[in-house]
Image: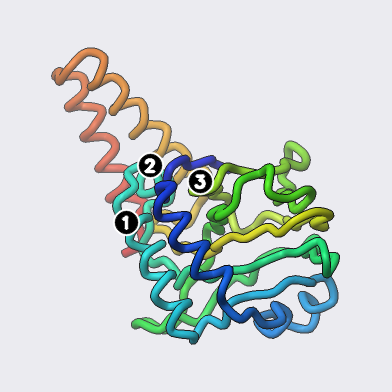
């Protein structure tokens, strides 16, 4: 499942983060990938051990924690430290088609994070740059994503994807990976749709015995399928 999650950051939060990022020193993004990735990756990143990167990453993580749609869709068990990248037209920056690594180092126990989901949080408006589309391939074709500042796209890490060349301006984003309580994307999608339907029915009709039964099924499936 690929999902647009609006309003992860407010306009004020985006403005504050961008002001600090625009004044930061960026490094070659190829330093964080293997040999294969380095062949197709041309961008810059904020070094992840930089105090600024950790501070801003913590702010993004806090915003994710308070967003109910993100929790419902991702059912996060672990979330990697959010990182930050920048693609500029002046350097013809892009990231060719690739797939994210299956696991990543994780500072807390158990020391590794399985990448079930990838997420990109946009920190600039679509009219600030040309090109720079996140293009995700799945069994239904290719999907191009370019969202308003503060919005996030969530998609399975198994997807082959790219960032097309930026031809004007600069594309600035945060990105991260999530290990879900539910490894299987199909099961996670079913739980998300069930949860969203329960919430919509509750708003429309109020509490009922039927909704209690549906909620019970949701939690029993989560209990049956979760890996905790």
x and y percent of residue 220 in the render? Answer: 26, 42
Q: Single out the mark in the foreground, 3 or 2.
A: 3
Asked if residue 9 lies left or right of residue 45, the reply is left
Residue at label 2?
Answer: 69
Residue at label 1?
Answer: 65
Residue at label 3?
Answer: 151
Give the spatial CA distance, label 3 vs label 2: 12 Å
Give the spatial CA distance, label 1 vs label 2: 10 Å
Asked if residue 73 lies left or right of residue 85, the reply is left
x and y percent of residue 72 in the render? Answer: 36, 44
Front-most of 5 and 214? 5
Q: Single out the mark in the foreground, 3 or 1.
A: 3
Q: Residue at x 78, y 71 (%)?
A: 41
Contact, mark 3 vs mark 2 (Cβ under 8 Å): no
Residue 120: assigned label: none
Contact, mark 1 vs mark 2 (Cβ under 8 Å): no
Contact, mark 3 vs mark 1 (Cβ under 8 Å): no
């Amino acid at each position: 499942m690929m999902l647009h999650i609006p309003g992860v950051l407010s306009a004020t939060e985006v403005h504050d983060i961008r002001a600090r990022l625009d004044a930061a020193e960026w490094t070659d993004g190829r330093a964080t990938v293997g040999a294969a990735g380095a062949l197709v990756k041309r961008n810059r990143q904020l070094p992840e051990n930089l105090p600024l990167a950790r501070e801003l990453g913590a702010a993004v993580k806090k915003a994710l924690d308070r967003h109910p749609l993100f929790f419902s869709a991702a059912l996060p068990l672990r979330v990697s430290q959010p990182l930050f990248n920048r693609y500029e037209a002046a350097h013809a920056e892009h990231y060719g088609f690739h797939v994210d690594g299956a696991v990543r180092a994780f500072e807390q126990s158990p020391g590794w994070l399985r990448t079930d989901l990838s997420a990109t949080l946009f920190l600039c408006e679509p009219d600030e740059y040309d090109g720079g589309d996140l293009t995700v391939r799945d069994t239904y074709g290719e999907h191009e994503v370019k969202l308003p500042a503060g919005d996030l796209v969530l998609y399975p890490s198994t997807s082959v994807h790219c960032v097309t060349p930026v031809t004007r301006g600069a594309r600035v984003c945060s990105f991260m990976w999530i290990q879900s309580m539910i490894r299987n994307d199909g099961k996670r999608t079913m739980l998300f749709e069930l949860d969203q339907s329960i919430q919509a029915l509750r708003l429309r009709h109020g509490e009922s015995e039927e909704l209690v039964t549906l909620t019970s099924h949701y939690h029993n499936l989560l209990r049956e399928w979760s890996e905790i």
